[in-house]
Image: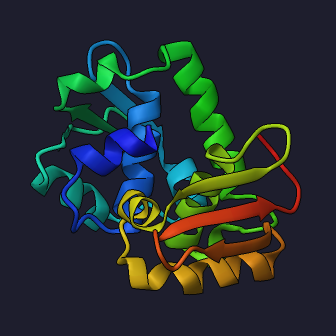
Amino acid sequence: MLSYLAAALPESTPAPARLLALQCALRVDTAMQVRLPKGMLRSLRLDTPELWRELEQARWLRIGPASVANEVEAELLDAALLSQAPARPDRTQAADWALRVAGSSTVGTAAGPLLQLASLYLTAHADPDSGTGLTGLDQMARACGAPPADMPDALDQLAGTGLLQCWQTCRDWGDLCWTLTAFRK
């Protein structure tokens, strides 16, 4: 889903809006409707109207009238979303997993959306047995909504939180390899 969002959203979409889009994409129903509890949005620090407007201006969703005071309703406009794997029950599980990873005590919401999204990306793209991963640094930066030059600092911060045991980039190819301290997939 992170790869889909990297392609579907404009490159200028910042990390907080991408984190919100991820929860929307994982929780959308077959009618392209999503309802997110405001408490969950507050816990992720994604409860600002500007983030919704950012996704609306990207023509990725349309904000609906809130049916109750404690949730936000929207209609997602990209029909290709429903063709993305996994199926709805698995996406709902993935949304809950993403909440746990993004809000974990290791990274925490105080770290900010870029670190939360980077944590999700690294954890989702790590080998389930070894906790190691390999990807293009520019590919990760695009998925996280950040310039590639910002990623080394973010990776250092994630190492400081204890999420990453180590990381390095290959200067010739720009590949990023990492090892998670404790794998939580």
Is residue 67 toward the left or the right of residue 165 in the image?
Answer: left
**Image quarter for residue 13?**
bottom left
Is residue 48 toward the left or the right of residue 157 in the image?
Answer: left
Is residue 5 toward the left or the right of residue 19 in the image?
Answer: left
Determine if residue 72 is in view: no
**Image quarter for residue 94?**
top right
Q: Could you tell me which residue is drawn at 19 percent across and 23 percent down? A: 79
Quarter placement of the N terminus: top left
Percent across and percent down for residue 145 are 36, 66
Percent across and percent down for residue 87 are 48, 14
**Camera-nearest residue between 2 and 22:** 2
Q: Could you tell me which residue is drawn at 79 percent across and 66 percent down? A: 163
**Camera-nearest residue between 184 and 174:** 174
Percent across and percent down for residue 144 are 43, 63
Q: Could you tell me which residue is drawn at 23 percent across and 32 percent down? A: 76
Percent across and percent down for residue 30 are 33, 12
Determine if residue 5 is in view: yes
In this view, which residue lies farthest toward the right?
A: 182
Q: How is the image coloured?
A: rainbow
